[in-house]
Amino acid sequence: MQVAKTEEVKQILENYFEKKEEIIKNHYNGETGLNTVRALSDLTDETIRKFAEISFKNPKDISIVVLGGYGRRELCFKSDIDISLVFKEENFEQLKEGLENFYYLLLDLKVDIGFSPRDIKTFVKLAKEDLTVATSLLQGRFLWGNEEIFKELQDKFKKLIKKKRHEYITATLRARKLRYEKTGSSIYMMEPHVKEGEGGLRDFHEVFWIAKVLDDVEDYRYFVDKKIILEEEYIELVRAYDFILKIRNQMHLICNKKCDVLVFSLQGEVAKKLGYALPDDDEEALRASVEQMMKLYYLNAKSINTITKRILKNLTETHDFEIHTPIDAVFSRTATELDVFNAEKFEKDVSNVVRAFKYYKEYELDFSSQLEYLIRKNEKKLKDNLTEDTKKLVREIFSDVKNLAKTIRKMQEFYVIDELIPEFGYQRCHFQYDAYHKYTTDAHAIKAVEMLESLKKQDTPQRKSMYELYKDIERKDLLIWAIFLHDIGKGHKTDHSVLGSKMAVDILTRFGYSKRDAKIVSDLVLYHLEMAKISQRRNIHDPKVLDEFIKIVKNKEFLKMLTVLTWCDANAVGPNAWNEWKNSLLWELYYKAYAILDKGISAEELHKRQIEEKRKKALALLTTEFGEKEAKKLLERVSDYYISSTPLDDILKHIKLEYRLLKTGEPQFLFEKNSSIGFSEIVMAVKDIENPLLAFTGILSNMQVNILSIYSYTRKDDTILINAHVSTATLDAIDESKFQKFLNMFNEYRNGKLTIKDLRKKRQTVFKSASLPPPTFVKVDNKMSDSYTIFDISAKDRIGLLFDIIHVFSKFDLYVHIAKVTTQGERARDSFYVRTKDKTKINDEKLIEKVKKELLKVIKPKEKEIA
């Protein structure tokens, strides 16, 4: 039965909540994470002791023990309060009423309670069988009652854990591995688990538990005293732990419950509450603030993960006799690790710090604890002491991609890469606040190198073809540097390609490369985005586009390098960022550029030759179908652009469709479902229908169908052919029933029963996302094409976006010829080739500004606004 709330109880609770509010206020005023959790733990101690005095008549009968984070005096605002009430077996009956009263009083604290009344025998038995119980006891702290009962429990537990320490450590290490797998196996998750994730609070706890099992340690200073870590590493570790505790506390306050995953929707709120952002910051300012906060998170998580791993290795490694094979006068190796003969010799030559990583890469062996300690002790000497030996060692490490990504990660773990290349050190844990990039900038750069190394597997058609290209490159070392440095300019609020190209020159010359070599790497960094941009957002069948691209690449060797760099960069972004469609566009651009360079002719001349050859082949195919006279008539209607950009099989398919249209006067359609590659194809041939492209996209939008790519071709006889790849919202191919619905709605539009206005009215409401939208802008390129004005648009991707954009163009009597649609996570990066009804590009600057203004309105929908 619940105990009545006496005045005494009310006063205790009032005191608790008042003081808790003070702790929250201090948190917002800048109090450290550790001081906050300790203050909350101490307040909870004070309150629970008072509850115990009210509930139990005889303190000698029971021992109240607090466990877990509370036992460590690290209680976050919404953490569980884990309490065990330990008693001797014979005392249970007389404690029943007190236990019940005590439990109900605890519920008034309005937090989750872990409540476990146990006798000593049961507690020890459970600890023997259950890792969680054993771990909780390792952190157990006596709070109230009979301390002798607690000491008896501790004595029995210590004897047990001494016998079972090997099993306990093995189970803890296994649990650590499973925990990483469950939470993403990376420190650099865009939505990290601050408690259980890699680099989270649990990493800090587990090392301490294992040390306590092995040597009953009291705190982390033990590891400094034993020369396992440096004094400065101890300070770094405690500071990092404090930071993540503060983040976790803020998450608990915002959610008003225990929540440990720092999701996108929380990141902005946490940044505001902790003072990284101002309450009225606009999207760009808030994005910058979140990126700053998350960079600090990753830096601190990395510190926890790196230092605790090193401690863990020292605690768990065996010291059985092993044969040491000399590598040189300083280094040796065993079957499992690299070591040194003499620490003094190692420290006399600073280049030995880098040499250790050369051997790490070469022998694929980890460092001994002694070598790890020496590297951390001496790595700062590299900063102002770049010897010729060190430069040569760096060149050797970067000369071959085998095992390179792993080596760079190891160099980063020990801050060696930061000392050698401070520009890369600046990028450590640089966070990009979007749903496209799945890694921080530094992790992405290393991942790109890893993608280059993966080519040798040749386990997919993409890797196989790219590896063949890579093998033909003469200076693979320069390509390796370009891939590693391609984003080196990020994080400086300027064009990262331009800044990065300048940095690349400094870095390459720093390590003894020639000016010519540095220039090649610099140019690769400068133009590393060009192939993706041109292939995905420009008309690569336009000779002018190709001529501009040839001016960049200049020769076949550079073209090969840039192609491989583009593939590695895109595939290192994250899952699903690259697909077969983007890959085919990249190769198409490569082959066109290679043919121009190989034949030594202009893009215009090559284009002309290819069109002539393709028209002949198309005519031959059509002649067998329609006869020569009809074939010529049908083929004369189509533009050179259509011929150059469309495969022969599709040309035949499209012209057959148009032939039926011309004979019947009725719109014609083709539908093909491609389940294996996740989209369906819809082709439509129409004539004498107003705004067919707008109707086409509007109907699909109304049906919640996603448009992946779309082309619109107007023939010389005003026939319009529209070709689109479409999918469901979950990127699956749409089925026949959906296509039938599309046909029915199009017929309603054609017959006047359905209007564009109706399609817009029937659209579903668009709600504002909880997370920040990606960069939103409209840019205009009036130089790249002689016939079209190109609109480049970046916005949050959604079904119906394409329809909204085309609708804006239609309001100004502008017509979309090509829509090149690219999705980057939640971000749409679309390009539209647009011209006037007179079939000219837009030359009126005022009109361009009006169109841009209207486009921005539809790509930035307001909350609950129908877009």
Image (cartoon, helix red, strand yellow):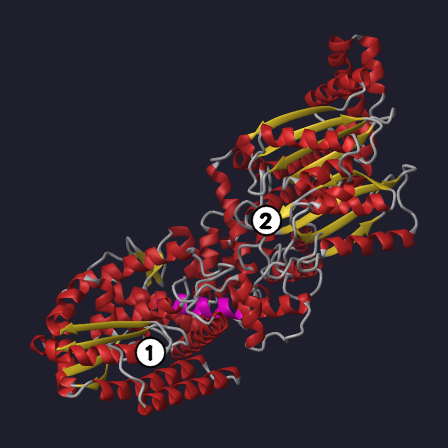
Q: Position of residue 805 (x, y in %)?
A: 76, 47
Hey, which quadrant is residue 724 in on the image?
Answer: top right
Q: Main secondary structure of the magenta part?
A: helix
Q: Secondary structure at mark 2?
A: helix
Which amino acid, by three-letter code, is at mark 2? Answer: Asp
Q: Is residue 824 left or right of residue 234?
A: right
Q: How many numbered discs sit on the rendered protein?
A: 2
Q: Position of residue 166 (x, y in %)?
A: 18, 62
- N-terminal label among 1 and 2: 1
In the rendered structure, which segment of residues is drawn in magenta? Answer: 296-308
Calculate the distance from the C-alpha at mark 1 to the C-alpha at mark 2: 41 Å
Placement of the N terminus among the 4 image quadrants: bottom left
- Look at 35% across and 65% down and name the residue there: 309
Q: Is residue 135 above or below residue 44?
A: above
Q: Is residue 324 left or right of residue 593?
A: left
- Look at 41% across and 51% down and name the residue there: 362
Hey, which quadrant is residue 715 in on the image?
Answer: top right
Q: Which residue is mark 2?
A: 569
Which amino acid, by three-letter code, is at mark 1? Answer: Val
Q: Is residue 229 above or below residue 698?
A: below
Magenta stretch encompasses residue 300: yes
Q: Is residue 207 above or below residue 472?
A: below
Q: Is residue 206 above or below residue 142?
A: above
User: Looking at the image, which is closer to me, 226 or 18?
Assistant: 18
Q: Which residue is mark 1?
A: 224
Q: Position of residue 604 (x, y in %)?
A: 83, 32
- Look at 33% across and 78% down and name the residue there: 224
- Look at 87% across and 46% down and name the residue there: 812
For disc 1, the neighbor class at 10 Å (few under 14, some 14 to 19, many from 20) is some
Q: Position of residue 338 (x, y in %)?
A: 34, 59
